[in-house]
Image (cartoon, rainbow, N blue to C red):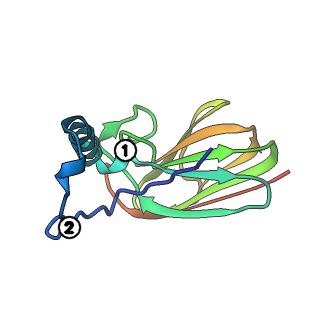
Amino acid sequence: MMNLRMNLSNLTLNLSNLTLNLSNLTLKRLTVIGLTLALILALPQGAWADREKLSAGTPLSISGTSGGTTNSGDCGYIATTPNHVIDVTEDLTFWQIRVKTAGSPTLLIDGPGGRYCVLPEGGLLQFSGYGTPGTYKLFIGDRAQGKHPYTLSVSGRQ
């Protein structure tokens, strides 16, 4: 099975030098190509969340922009799609997620154990504990609807 990873946030298409030889393409193929391109370009920028795998001893450091337009109710304003998706591949007896950013940040974690909202404590926004294998959706929000650059650090051990 082939793994495909795409980051379309900085996608630029230069069609000025594009030449198509239509003699070998059927109308059906052109329709499929056109629809695929239209779907990709129609997706909002946030629809392509960063997806990472985490195993013991492999730390991650990821950056992005906090906040969004969706009121989560209890965890500030978040993007409509997760900022990051982390696949934990094995039991982690301890893992830690830290966010460094400005503003009024929040960390919303939606994973196998449930949904957790993390608020800053003493100026530090972090979550730690036992990590079960599975998929975790991370939203970096802001209680004041701000948007700020952040760095997310994740580490885990068995």
Q: Vertical placement of 112 versus 51: above or below?
A: above
x%, y% of residue 22? Answer: 18, 51
| 2 relative to 59 in the view: left or right | left
Q: Quadrant of residue 82?
A: top left
Q: Vertical placement of 114 versus 95: above or below?
A: above
Q: Which residue is mark 2?
A: 14
Residue pushed farthest bottom?
17
Q: Residue at x 44, y 55 (%)?
A: 6
x%, y% of residue 124? Answer: 58, 59
Q: Along the line of sight, which residue is nearer the eye, 79 or 17?
A: 17
Q: Which residue is mark 1?
A: 47
The disc label shown at residue 9, or none: none
Labels 1 and 2: the sequence-earlier one: 2
**Closer mark to the observer between disc 1 and disc 2:** 2
Q: Residue at x 73, y 38 (%)?
A: 133
Q: Is residue 40 visible?
A: yes
Q: Residue at x 79, y 55 (%)?
A: 56
Q: Residues within 10 Å of mark 2 (few under 14, many from 20)?
A: few
x%, y% of residue 116? Answer: 58, 36
Query: Could you tell me the amino acid type at mark 1?
Result: Ala
Query: Could you tell me the amino acid type at mark 2?
Result: Asn
Q: Is residue 143 visible?
A: no
